[in-house]
């Protein structure tokens, strides 16, 4: 078997921990037929990703897996050179490749890497290393074959993530004495695709009217069908408690439970959150949120409020046992966004509702934090509830103090 087009190399983290070539016959055949360094490099990547998943987070594992997989496939198929022999100019060549990959390397949707067939994991033929972002407005169109893949260009954030992963990968390989240097670190400053960005950053959030339509829509859906109580609870939690979608989801290292809500001696409610960087934090739970917690628990036949030793899953599957994945939670939120868009479009027109077509679950976190800051809540308190390591991050992302002052003074400029 000779590899001429990209195939997935690494499964999900939980499957990588028990990886056996007998379960992946295509990969087994591939590495037996190619140069020995292919298998050696695959094992380097495997060890690095195991280390990443164990010491960082599943999210970081997924992000680094994407980058390491692409890089190894490029070294196998395109460069045909072991990565411990690559130098600065080779990495810059790889950056050019990432900037304009072949159409055959680009997909139009998220795809599983492997499919289970007859007890074995086989490569999904629809998977591709790169993905062109399709506007949400086109996602309901049946045929997206007309999307011009040649228009793919990575964002500055994507390009930065690629270099970050390569630099960390090479640092790991140096520590394991597989490589003598870090060409990715040297190459980054000379990459011609990086742009110095001095733009005013736009916070991706909903306006107050848009948020009101989302909340009202979720409440109406829940009032009409108890099944949607879960959707209402998720949306209220993401916005009011400033949560990331992963912080509500079931993960190998953490299972959110009702017992993570707790009350201090002054009757203040808190929620224990397992966040980014494998850090635990306690976020404040406002009184206005408690009715949403109570009605969701009532829909599940639970007591009014949780107890500290309660092991009940925080967000429950309708069918089956255990908590929900981030993907399933996103689907719940997206259903409400879609309905809220239609309601707002009908009432006040498409222009004012349009952002609801672009919105993602993370916009709810941004929306909640931005609104609290606008109401005058101390920046330090909001920053700690968000789980930011420093208030400067909160100010940069949500407040834009200097930009707002500049915009205000800019309004006063005269034509005459």
Image (cartoon, rainbow, N blue to C red):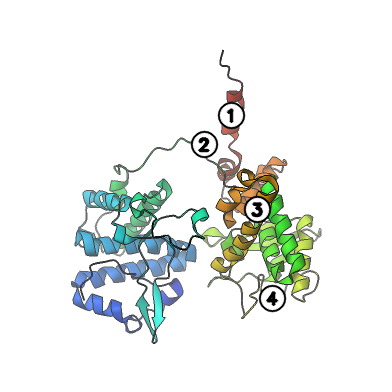
Tell me if residue 166 comes above or below residue 197 in the rendering.
Answer: below
Mark 4 or mark 2, earlier in chain: 2
Question: Disc 3 marks which residue?
Answer: 385
Spatial CA distance of label 3 from label 1 is 28 Å
Q: Are marks 3 and 4 in contact (CB under 8 Å)?
A: no
Could you tell me how far apart the alpha carbons at marks 3 and 2 are, in whole angstroms?
25 Å
Secondary structure state at the residue bearing disc 1? helix
Q: State which quarter of the image contains the N terminus.
A: bottom left
- Which labelled disc corresponds to residue 407? 1
Query: Which mark is drawn over residue 200?
Result: 2
Asked if disc 4 and disc 2 are in contact, CB closer than 8 Å, the reply is no
Please state if 377 lies on the left or on the right of 21 as rendered: right
Q: Residue 312: give its label.
A: 4
Q: Are marks 1 and 2 in contact (CB under 8 Å)?
A: yes
Disc 1 to disc 4: CB gap under 8 Å:
no
Q: Residues within 10 Å of mark 1 (few under 14, many from 20)?
A: few
Mark 4 vs mark 2, CA separation in Å: 44 Å
């Amino acid at each position: 078997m000779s590899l001429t087009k990209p195939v997935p190399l690494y499964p999900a983290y939980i499957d990588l921990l028990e990886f056996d070539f007998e379960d992946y016959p295509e990969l087994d055949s591939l590495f037996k037929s190619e140069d020995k360094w292919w298998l050696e490099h695959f094992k380097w990547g495997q060890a690095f990703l195991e280390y990443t998943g164990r010491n960082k987070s599943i999210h970081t594992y997924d992000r680094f897996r994407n980058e390491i997989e692409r890089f190894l496939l490029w070294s196998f198929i395109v460069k045909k050179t072991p990565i411990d022999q690559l130098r600065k100019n080779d990495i810059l060549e790889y950056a050019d490749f990432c900037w304009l990959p072949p159409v055959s390397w680009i997909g139009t949707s998220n795809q599983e890497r492997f499919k289970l067939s007859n007890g074995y994991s086989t490569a999904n033929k629809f998977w591709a290393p790169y993905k062109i972002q399709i506007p949400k407005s086109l996602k309901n169109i049946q045929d997206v074959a007309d999307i011009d893949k040649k228009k793919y260009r990575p964002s500055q954030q994507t390009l930065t993530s690629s270099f970050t992963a390569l630099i960390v990968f090479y640092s790991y390989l140096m520590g394991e004495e597989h490589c003598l240097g870090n060409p990715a670190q040297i190459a980054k400053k000379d990459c011609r695709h990086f742009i110095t960005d001095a733009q005013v950053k736009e916070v991706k959030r909903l306006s107050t009217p848009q948020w009101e339509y989302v909340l009202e829509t979720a409440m109406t859906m829940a009032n009409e069908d108890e099944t949607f109580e879960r959707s209402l609870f998720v949306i209220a939690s993401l916005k009011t408690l400033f949560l990331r979608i992963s912080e509500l989801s079931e993960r190998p290292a953490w299972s959110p439970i009702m017992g993570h809500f707790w009350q201090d001696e002054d009757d203040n409610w808190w929620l224990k959150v397992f966040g980014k960087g494998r850090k635990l934090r306690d976020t404040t739970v406002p009184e206005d949120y408690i009715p949403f917690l109570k009605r969701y628990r009532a829909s599940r036949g639970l007591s009014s409020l949780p107890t500290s030793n309660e092991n009940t899953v925080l967000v429950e599957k309708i069918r089956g046992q255990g908590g929900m994945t981030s993907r399933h939670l996103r689907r719940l939120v997206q259903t409400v966004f879609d309905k809220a868009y239609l309601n707002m479009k009908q009432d006040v027109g498409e222009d004012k509702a349009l952002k609801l077509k672009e919105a993602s679950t993370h916009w709810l976190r941004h929306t909640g934090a931005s609104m609290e800051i606008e109401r005058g809540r101390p920046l330090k308190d909001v920053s700690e509830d968000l789980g930011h390591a420093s208030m400067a991050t909160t100010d940069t992302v949500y407040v834009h103090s200097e930009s707002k002052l500049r915009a205000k003074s800019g309004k006063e400029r005269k034509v005459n």
